[in-house]
Amino acid sequence: MKSFCGKVSLMAVLVSGLVVAHSALAAEVKIGVVLPLSGALSGYGQPSQKGLELIQGITPTLKNGDTIKLVVIDDKSDKVEAANAMQRLVSSDKVDAVIGEVTSSNTLAMVKIADDTKTPLVSSTATNDRVTRNHPYVSRVCFSDSFQGVVGANLASRDLNAKTAAIVFDSSNDYSVGLAKAFRTQFLKNGGTIPIEVQAPSGSKDFKAQLSSVKAKNVDMIYMPIYYTEGALIAVQAKQLGLDKPVVGGDGLAADPVFFDVGKDAVNGYMTTDYYSPNAKEQTPSGEAFIKAWEAKFNSPTHTWGAMAADAYNVIVNAMNQCNDPHDRVCVNEKIRATKDFQGVTGVLTLKDGDAVRSAVINEVKDGQLAFKTVVNP
């Protein structure tokens, strides 16, 4: 009887051990996500969420078998909500890393919390230079405004042969201010002049007074680092006023169907600096797979912001795979910032001090959609 009880006891220990081992094998890492899924900036957040859903389906686990769980919060396009979401993710949800936000102003509201709690924060598309500056736990897979602003200025000077330019921007928007500053500095350095700068405040509907002032200056081109809703309205009103000049914008100008739906033929010929184009001939293996999966799942062309969000996910997962403990946020952050020659969805990614060193793509609007024009290397 004692022998039987001993066997039962041994069996219980073995079963208990197997349960513990199974629990370890079924471990989970949590990646928080902060996106503007509603509100004025939802045109950026919704395709970003699609990209994350798609890439999680492609890579649902770490190499060690740990399941990857996404904890998604809608910040309603508000920077206070973005900060609150970041605080909740690190305090209540105990996430191991965070993806977000997609705009500069909202990301800047989150960076101090990331640093204070030593939580890796990776933005897919927040380009303002201050996002990563002096923030050791903040990284991004996009280039900075100082880079794309220079690319825009060089495009104006060298490809468009522009000697004079007007800047149409929003001084209340960190993204817009950063791009305008970088463009202004480089365009003047190239020997050009900027006789007029006008405001295009977010939420405004009528820009005819500003555009009339621009038309009176007869500049060679217009630089317009603003978002898609105002951009479309400006395009329509510029056409009504007979203001027919080449327009170059940043990555956020044509990132939502609203730009094309509202702007219609008025936006044809508009050019943007961008991170990526699914129409480019050269794609990474990951990029080819992602494009096929996107088109199959959503029956639409791959959205740049969805692809960029996927790469934010990929960079975090790649870092976690290099740490003995994927919950070690210090290690994960170090590996994120040490990313080098990583084959991402949108190209080959290398990070330096949290910033992506990557090429810029120039896209041009043709027949109601973005068409690949050329690549500019850093």
Image (tube, rainbow, N blue to C red):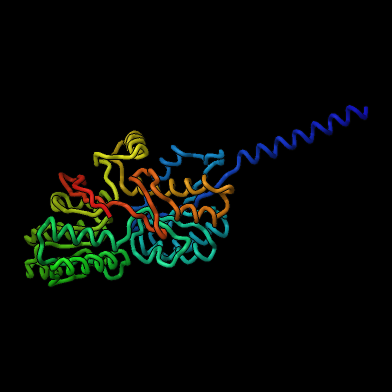
Q: Residue at x 38, y 43 (%)?
A: 343
**Of the pair 373 and 104, the residue shown nearer to us:** 373
Q: In this view, does 238 lie above or below 339?
A: below
Q: In this view, does 3 lie above or below 177?
A: above
Can you say which quadrant of the picture contains the N terminus? top right
**Of the pair 94 and 45, the residue shown nearer to us:** 94
Location of residue 155 by image quarter: bottom left
Q: Is residue 41 above or below residue 326?
A: below
Q: Which residue is drawn at 26% across and 52% down?
A: 377
Q: Position of residue 42 (x, y in %)?
A: 35, 54
Q: Where is residue 346 in the image (x, y as percent from the top left)?
A: 33, 45
**Residue 240 shows in this picture:** no
Left or right of residue 256, residue 100 in this image: right
**How many numbered marks appear?**
0
Q: Residue at x 32, y 52 (%)?
A: 358
Left or right of residue 66, residue 283 in this image: left
Q: Where is residue 182 in the image (x, y as percent from the top left)?
A: 25, 66
Location of residue 5 by image quarter: top right
**Residue 293 shows in this picture:** yes
Q: Which residue is drawn at 9% across and 59% down?
A: 161
Extreme residue toward the right, this view: 1
Location of residue 301 by image quarter: top left
Can you say which quadrant of the picture contains the C terminus? bottom left
Q: Where is residue 62 in the image (x, y as percent from the top left)?
A: 52, 41
Left or right of residue 84, residue 149 in this image: left
**Of the pair 103 and 156, the residue shown nearer to us:** 156
